[in-house]
Amino acid sequence: MATTISVRLDTALIKDLSEIEKNWQADRSEAIRRLLAKAVNSWKIQNALERLRQHKISIGKAAEECGLTLWEMLDIARENNIDWTGYSKEDLERDLSFLEGKS
């Protein structure tokens, strides 16, 4: 079900919106819907990346929340230099020392 909302926009934003409408050959409602959908999607990804960076969610949960595949989310995390594993250099050194002691 669609809901109608009302919003006040300043003159500069209306001018920019008019340019977008012309470029997309779309009416104002369509242009606003497309821009808003893109902005919401971008916000979801940025929010998930921040929570991923803080190790508050898993990579799988981040992908699910963003409506992306795991591979897409892995690519985005890599592009943003996010260590989603939580596996530090110290963890690696400890594990390697443990394995060397087992030999």
Image: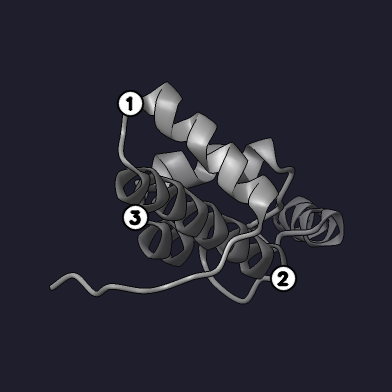
Earlier sequence position, callout 3 versus callout 1: 1
Give the number of the mark in front: 2 or 3. Answer: 3
Q: Where is residue 69 in the image (x, y as percent from the top left)?
A: 35, 46
Q: For the residue marked with disc 2, what is the amino acid? A: Gln
Classify mark 2: residues with Cα within 10 Å, few (<14), some (14-19) or many (20+): few
Distance Cα–Cα, label 2 vs label 1: 42 Å
**Of the pair 8 and 38, the residue shown nearer to us:** 8
- Name the residue tied to disc 2: 54
- Name the residue tied to disc 3: 67
What residue sits 41% from the left and 51% below the top? Answer: 32
Colour scheme: one colour
Q: How many labels does the image show?
A: 3
What residue sits 31% from the left and 34% below the top? Answer: 26
The image shows residue 7, relative to residue 83, as above or below, that is below
The image shows residue 75, relative to residue 46, as above or below, that is above
Q: For the residue marked with disc 1, what is the amino acid? A: Gln
What residue sits 74% from the left and 43% below the top? Answer: 81
Q: Where is residue 9 in the image (x, y as percent from the top left)?
A: 59, 61
- Name the residue tied to disc 1: 25
Classify mark 3: residues with Cα within 10 Å, few (<14), some (14-19) or many (20+): some
Distance Cα–Cα, label 2 vs label 3: 20 Å
Q: Is mark 1 on a helix, strand or loop?
A: loop
Q: Is mark 2 on a helix, strand or loop?
A: loop
Distance Cα–Cα, label 3 vs label 1: 28 Å
**Of the pair 70 and 17, the residue shown nearer to us:** 17
Q: Position of residue 12 (x, y in %)?
A: 69, 47
Q: For the residue marked with disc 3, what is the amino acid? A: Gly
Left or right: 75, with 26 as reference point: right
Q: What element carries label 3?
A: loop
